[in-house]
Image (cartoon, rainbow, N blue to C red):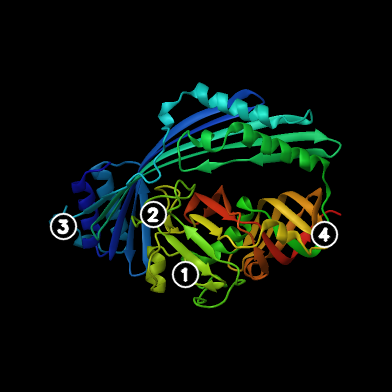
Amino acid sequence: MLSETLVGDVLSRARLGGADYAELYVERWRRRSLRMLSGEVKEAASGLEYGAGLRLIYGTEVVYAYTNDLSAESLLELTETLVKLKGRVGQVDAQGRGGLDFRKQAARGLHAPEVPLSARDRRYRVERLLEAETAARVAPEIKQVQTQLLEWEQEVLVATSEGRWVEDRRVRTRYVVTAIAQGEGGMQTGSFGPGLSVGLELFDHHPPSVVGRKAGEQAMTNLRAKPAPAGTMPVVIGNAFGGVIFHEALGHLLETTSVAKKASVLSDKLGEKVASPCVTYIDDGTTPHGWGSSEFDDEGLATERTVLIENGVLKSYMVDRWGALRTGLRPTGSGRRQDYTFAPTSRMRNTFIAPGDTPKEKLFEGIEYGLYAKDMGGGQVKPGSGEYNFGVKEAYIIRHGRIEEPVRGAMLVGKGPDSISKIVAVSSDLETAPGMCGSLSGSLPVEVGQPHLLISEIVVGGQA
């Protein structure tokens, strides 16, 4: 995307200006979206972003700037602007130009799509979304169905003053079906939205007939559901998107973005018991075609599988370069950013609780009265402490060990480190689900996941 000479010039000038480390991040990003409502195309959009961000590190202090003008004049001016912030511009001269010997690495295509996004026209996409809508209309009470398809193609170059030159290509596809049902239970929704680091073969992995039906059936379940009870009770949380609670209320506490500042209740806890012994918690940037996967992170380091908690004991944090400087820990390939307008920070990729050995049906045995949170929704978390409240999209009462009537309006309230200590059994049916996570370095694609698991007690907010 840029010549080696120009990149070397920028980084060398930054080093001559006194920076201990300089990093140039360049990207080209094409996005497409298609949205349909009740059989009609409501929005079809595409866009191309192209830009670069320059990060300089002085000790543990970071300065960052970006531009969408990738001419030599603009990039060199950007470099001098950042150096001036440290008062070292007089040391930048022509003698340092282009003096870096780069060690080049290119992505091996581990997550390459089988069906490129360019291989199908808009008609094909519209037909797939219409299939999903038809499947979602499982009953006359389904009054409206919205479908949306999102496609990303991103090319990335990361070059550093240490001589690292990394190129990566990332393709992601996701579609979401939302069904609205109306009847005596008012107006209720159901939704399902698979996404992977793949091309249009996503429709083969997750057929529209299946995705649409799941959304429609969930809407109908909520339509006939009664108000959820309130109180403290045992809760079985479903697999896949059930993992969003621990992503938000635990995962963020393990990023060095907060750990290094002592802003996390899990700072300085390495080697200590922080969870139930049946919990192993993993963040994996290498998951084949995972929604949050890439071959390299946004600092140019190879991604890896990071075991954060093993059998209840804290083993590692998610560490970016800045976090490594502050903590002395090894980087884990966790430096991520939304795009070139953000500096990277430590972020989750594909984060999940590992499978256990308890059969799913055994989780419900012995529960006289509790809640089955089959599918989780969104919520809020207090940074640093992990205090949370999350809505439940689909829930059922557990009575005498059996799953019984559906309820709606349930809210789970707790504290991440406390809740993960009260997990008493984990099944083997691990599944993951895609989502978007917002933090200091922007909004990023992440996977959350877990098997079905049982929490001995948790506060349930309800309406009954």
Instruction: Give the Cα separation between the discs numbered 4 and 2.
Output: 43 Å
User: What is the x, y in percent for residue 16?
Assistant: 21, 62
Label 3: which residue?
Answer: 96
Quarter containing the N terminus: top left
Q: CA distance from mark 1 to mark 4?
A: 36 Å
Q: CA distance from mark 3 to mark 1?
A: 39 Å
Of the numbered discs 4 and 2, the one sitting upstream in the chain is 4
Amino acid beneath label 1? Ser
**What amino acid is at disc 2?**
Asp
Residue 344 position (above or below residue 2): below
User: Of tags 1 and 2, which is closer to the observer?
Assistant: 1
Give the label on residue 297, or none: 2
**Which residue occupies 68% across, 32% down?**
136
Of the image marks 3 and 4, the number of the one nearer the N terminus:
3
Disc 4 secondary structure class: loop
Residue farthest to the left, as pictured = 95
